[in-house]
Amino acid sequence: MTPSEKIDSLIAGLTDWRGPTLARLRQLFHDADPEVVEEWKWMGSPVWSHDGIIAVGIALKTSVKLGFLYGANLPDPDNIFNTELEGNQRRGIKYYEGDRINEEPLKVLIRSAITYNQAKKATRK
């Protein structure tokens, strides 16, 4: 199975609110960046990349989490990061049942992560 097919299967297997939430988050990655690449890593986690990892999606028992690999380096003027705030690299967003996804700020954050990845890649050349 391709990574996208594995993500489809994961979402289909989440028969409660987490399935539609993860599906919506996935769509927002594609809306923010039509060139986003879907990967499957770390023993069963969807990963969205563009010139490097943007974020990992994780369906937990009571939440759906997006973990931004370099979130500490990204501007977050709308304060949508709500977990892993004390680290010097990662930041996360946890969604609980009934939470509203702040879609436009999330797409801005996704694009900021891509810009960060591209700048980091350019300095390695």
Image (tube, rainbow, N blue to C red):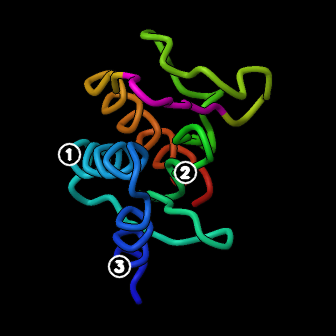
Looking at the rendered image, the disc whose residue lies closer to the viewer, 3 or 2, is: 2
Out of 116 and 64, give the one closest to the viewer. Answer: 64
- Residue 32: image x %, image y %? 25, 42
Precedes in sequence: disc 3 or disc 2:
3
Q: Which residues are magenta?
A: 91-99
Mark 3, residue position: 5
Determine whether, in the image, residue 77 is placed left or right of residue 21.
right
Q: Are marks 3 and 2 in contact (CB under 8 Å)?
A: no
- Mark 1, Cα crowd under 10 Å, few <14 / some 14-19 / many 20+, is few
Element under label 2?
strand
The amino acid at mark 3 is Glu
Q: Quadrant of residue 28?
A: top left
Out of 123 and 51, give the one closest to the viewer. Answer: 51
Precedes in sequence: disc 1 or disc 2:
1
Q: Give the spatial CA distance, label 1 vs label 2.
A: 21 Å
The amino acid at mark 1 is Asp
Mark 1, residue position: 31
Mark 2, residue position: 59
